[in-house]
């Protein structure tokens, strides 16, 4: 079985920073792309940043210039550095990874359980 576990969420004041981490574990044979999504109350889950195995990243406009996605392939980990946080960034943040499971040898999407980020004074 493959598991994705996020950490690093919490409560921060506007203008503050947080760093999220997401680690893949279990029967991981390989990981291609990794990404971060978020879902605010009453809204659909939205893509915010993604990164390829080689490190090419892309961002949605609301977070460009403030958030940075990175990864450590040796540790099967993806990070999201969030700076200049705004109240509208408050949401549950999820990581997603395309992983080849060593049991099935199939490439499929896996999701973490989410971590809450709250931005408030």
Image (cartoon, rainbow, N blue to C red):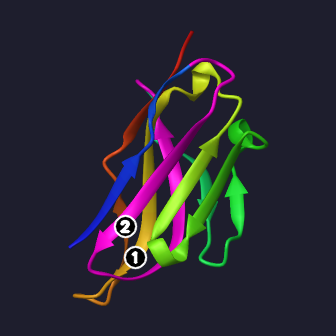
The quarter of the picture where the C terminus appears is top right
Which residue was labeled with disc 2? 24
Give how far across and how far down residue 89 sits, in percent: 58, 28
Decide whether residue 86 is among the magenta residues: no
The answer to which image quadrant residue 105 occupies is bottom left
Residue 28 horizontal side relative to residue 12, left or right: left
Give how far across and how far down residue 67 sits, in percent: 68, 44
Element type at marker 2?
Answer: strand
Up-down relation of residue 110 to residue 47 (above or below): below
Q: Main secondary structure of the magenta part?
A: strand
Which residue was labeled with disc 1? 99
Q: Nearer the viewer, mark 1 or mark 2?
A: 2
Residue 47 horizontal side relative to residue 67, left or right: left
Segment colored magenta: 13-42
- Residue reaching furthest to the right: 65
Going from the N terminus, do you reach mark 1 or mark 2 first? Answer: 2
- Residue reaching furthest to the top: 121
Identify the residue at horizontal 43%, vertical 56% (top origin). 22
Tell which of 119 and 38 is nearer to you.
Answer: 119
The quarter of the picture where the N terminus appears is bottom left
Residue 113 horizontal side relative to residue 36, left or right: left
Tell which of 117 and 35 is nearer to you.
Answer: 117
The answer to which image quadrant residue 24 occupies is bottom left
Give how far across and how far down residue 110 sits, in percent: 35, 64
Identify the residue at horizontal 54%, vertical 71% (top origin). 33
Identify the residue at horizontal 69%, vertical 22% (top origin). 15
Tell which of 101 and 77 is nearer to you.
Answer: 77
The answer, for residue 9, to whether it is visible in the render is: yes
Tell which of 111 and 79 is nearer to you.
Answer: 79
Identify the residue at horizontal 43%, vertical 47% (top origin). 94
1 and 2 marks in contact (CB < 8 Å):
yes
Up-down relation of residue 20 to residue 25 (above or below): above
């Amino acid at each position: 079985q493959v598991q994705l576990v996020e950490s690093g969420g919490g409560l921060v004041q506007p203008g503050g920073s947080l760093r999220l981490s997401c680690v893949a574990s279990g029967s991981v044979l390989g990981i291609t792309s990794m990404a971060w999504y978020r879902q605010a109350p009453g809204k659909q889950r939205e893509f915010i940043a993604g990164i390829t195995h080689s490190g090419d990243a892309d961002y949605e406009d609301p977070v460009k210039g403030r958030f940075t996605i990175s990864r450590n392939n040796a540790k099967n980990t993806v990070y999201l550095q969030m700076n200049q946080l705004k109240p509208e960034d408050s949401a549950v943040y999820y990581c997603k990874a395309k992983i080849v499971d060593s049991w099935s040898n199939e490439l499929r999407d896996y999701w973490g359980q989410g971590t809450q980020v709250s931005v408030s004074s």
